[in-house]
Image (spheres, helix red, strand yellow):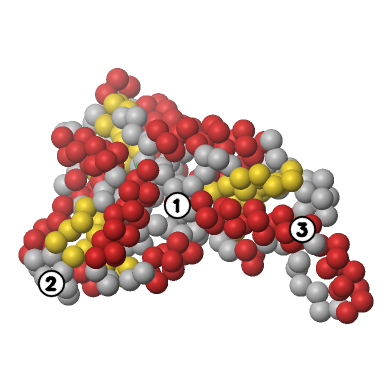
Amino acid sequence: MKVNVEIDKDSGFCNGVVRAIRTAEENLGQKRELYTLGAIVHNNSELDRLEKKGLKVIDKEQMARLSDTTVLIRAHGEPPSTYALAKENNIRLIDCTCPVVLQLQKKIADTGGQIVIFGKIGHAEVNGLVGRAEGRAVVVENIDQIDKVDFTKPVNIFSQTTKDPVEYAQVCDRIRERMLDKSSLTVHDTICRQVAQRHSRLSAFAQSHNVIIFVSGKESSNGKVLYELCKKHNPRSYNIQSLSQIDRNWFKSGDNIGVCGATSTPKWQLTSTARFLKIRLKSYICGKFYSIIYGNYSRF
Ligand code: SF4
């Protein structure tokens, strides 16, 4: 089958994730093992690679049982209670909170009154932001949840850094419509620049290819948003976590295939996906003849 395969040059880790992984690897070079509070990146293949080097993912309960050790804080950041726990248990923290998230945490801590966070409930970054607001924040995941807001009081709204800018604008507009004093809504532009730029470029990338293979972990919040964006612009978009999920029937001869991913997708995984597609689709015809003659033929 003759196809063209192209990798989106803008896909791959964002600066915050690159920094956290580089720091983890530097520290793993000195120690045999290192704890990270939560998955350092929402991508199982990359996590497996780092776990082989000695990185151990722990949760807050496990951290509470540790003492006199070192724990890495990932790019998403943590609420103040994590720092207090580390101090109590004599745990040294390697703080890899992304500078963009740190700035957002500080902004929320410095803002008075009612705070609304547009983000995913339970997401690590959102938990960190809620912690900074010290009980003044409500989290809204989508337009259907805006009834949580007290429309009679002034509102300061902030977005999780990886949310869709278009959806954020829609949520803000709907809240403004419901407010008694429309001028008492303050919208803070807190979506990460890298993410916002990726939205417009990825839309163009999805439109300029016949098929999109979007590689990202199931847990990636940014992955879900970007995959939906691809799907909106190209119905032949498929989200995969591993090569075994690729189905030959997704492709036709002459297709121009685009391979892309989330801010948590490593470049090496995009490259191996593209290589796999080039090799396997090219050899498909040979494989098809083989299957007709010998049977026992898989999806490729
Ligand atoms: S998406 Fe942006 S804000 Fe979030 S970790 Fe990456 S660089 Fe930092």
Residue depth check, mark 2 versus mark 3: number of the one nearer the observer:
3
Residue beneath disc 3 = 281
Task: Give the CA distance from mark 2 to mark 3.
Answer: 52 Å
- As drawn, is 299 to the left or to the right of 169? right
Task: Give the CA distance from mark 1 to mark 3.
Answer: 27 Å
Residue at image x 20%, y 56%? 94
Mark 1–mark 3 CB contact (< 8 Å): no
Disc 1 beta carbon < 8 A from ligand 1?
no
Q: Position of residue 193 (x, y in %)?
A: 40, 33
Q: Is residue 122 visible?
A: no
Q: Position of residue 46 (x, y in %)?
A: 45, 61
Q: Position of residue 85 (x, y in %)?
A: 13, 62
Residue at image x 37%, y 43%? 15
Residue at image x 21%, y 53%? 95
Quadrant showing the C terminus = bottom right
**Quick one: which residue is furthest to the top in this view?**
183
The amino acid type of the residue labelled 3 equals: Leu
Work out whether mark 1 precedes mark 3 in sequence or the reverse, and give the earlier one.
1
Task: Give the CA distance from mark 1 to mark 2.
Answer: 30 Å
Assign a secondary structure to mark 1: loop
Residue beneath disc 1 = 264
Q: Say which mark, if any, is on residue 67.
A: 2
Residue depth check, mark 1 versus mark 3: number of the one nearer the observer:
3
- As drawn, is 281 to the left or to the right of 289? left
